[in-house]
Amino acid sequence: MDAFTAGLLQRIRSTEHDLHRAREAGDDFLVEVEEAELDDLRRLAQEHGVQVVAS
C-alpha cells in the first residue's frame, strides 16, 4: 500500500470516528461538517481506485 492510499484510508477512519463522536454529542452542525468531509474523502478514494470498506 502506498503512502497516498494509507493516508487517505487513515483520514477516512479518523473522520468516521469524529462523525460518531459528533452524533453522540448531539452536535448537528459538526455532524454536517464531518459528513461532508467523509463524502469528499470517499469521492477522492473512488476517483483514485482506493477500496474503502464501509464501517
Image (spheres, rainbow, N blue to C red):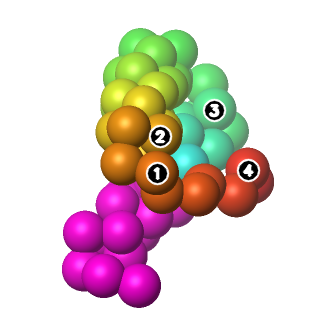
Q: Residue furthest bottom?
A: 1
Among the two numbered marks 1 and 4 on one chain, the one whose residue lies closer to the N terminus? 1
Label 2 – label 3 distance at C-alpha: 25 Å
Q: Which residue is mark 2?
A: 46
Name the residue at 55% across, 49% down.
Answer: 16
Magenta highlight range: 1-15
Label 2 – label 1 distance at C-alpha: 5 Å
Quadrant (top left/top right/bottom left/bottom right) for the N terminus: bottom left
Query: Which secondary structure lies at badge 1?
Result: loop
Q: Amino acid at mark 4?
A: Ala
Name the residue at 40% across, 22% down.
Answer: 36
Q: Amino acid at mark 1?
A: Gly
Name the residue at 24% across, 80% down.
Answer: 3
Q: Which mark is residue 23?
A: 3
Q: Amino acid at mark 2?
A: Gln
Q: Is residue 18 left or right of residue 2?
A: right
Res 10 quadrant in image: bottom left
User: Is residue 39 among the parts visible in the rendering?
Assistant: yes
Q: Which mark is residue 54?
A: 4
Do the residues bearing badges 2 and 4 touch, measured as CB atoms within 8 Å?
no
Q: Which residue is mark 1?
A: 49
**From the viewer's perspective, is the residue at label 4 or at label 3 nearer?**
4
Do the residues bearing badges 4 and 3 touch, measured as CB atoms within 8 Å?
no
